[in-house]
Amino acid sequence: MSGQNGELKLVISLKGDRASVGVQAPECDPLFFGIEGDLGAVLNGVPGFVEEARRRWETSKLNPECETPLPSQAKPAAPAGASTAPRSRGKSAAPSDQPPMF
């Protein structure tokens, strides 16, 4: 059984006729399930969610580490046609499709 002494944490979030159920055990990543129905239907579904979580934790308690860079870690791409030379503060020699702001 996952968790010491079978300890589990259950979180139920209800919104209208829809619910999200989170199941977590110590040293295991939480698992989330969605279900439609009133509170009674949600509570009837909880034992099945707990069993599904325990089955998954038997093979993998934690999600694998992300090995690819996150979008926030990637260097932004240079715009097409962008030059690495410093810009001059004078007027541009090339006409622009955008009207000047100042």
Image (spheres, rainbow, N blue to C red):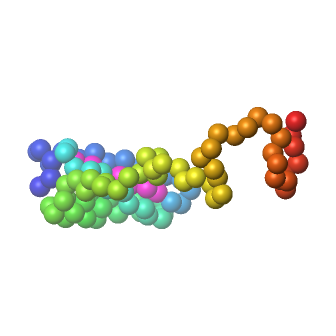
Looking at this view, is 59 or 68 the one in front? Answer: 68
Q: Tell me if I can see residue 23 in this picture.
A: no
Q: Tell me if I can see residue 58 in this picture.
A: yes
Image quadrant containing the C terminus: top right
Residue 39 in the image, given as x and y percentages of width and height: 45, 56
Task: Name the residue located 62 percent from the left edge and 44 percent from the top edge.
Answer: 85
Q: Which residues are magenta?
A: 19-25
Task: Name the residue located 66 percent from the left edge and 57 percent from the top edge.
Answer: 81
The reply, left or right, for residue 21 in relation to residue 87 is left
Quarter occupied by residue 64: bottom left
Residue 14 in the image, given as x and y percentages of width and height: 49, 52
Q: How many marks?
A: 0
Q: Is residue 42 magenta?
A: no
Residue 48 in the image, given as x and y percentages of width and height: 28, 65
Looking at this view, is 19 or 25 the one in front? Answer: 25
The reply, left or right, for residue 85 in relation to residue 96 is left
Task: Name the residue located 43 percent from the left edge and 46 percent from the top edge.
Answer: 73
Task: Name the residue located 53 percent from the left edge and 50 percent from the top edge.
Answer: 76
Image quadrant containing the N terminus: bottom left
Q: Is residue 29 above or below residue 55?
A: above
Main secondary structure along the magenta-highlighted residues: strand
Looking at this view, is 88 or 48 the one in front? Answer: 88
Residue 90 in the image, given as x and y percentages of width and height: 81, 36
Q: Is residue 9 above or below residue 38?
A: above
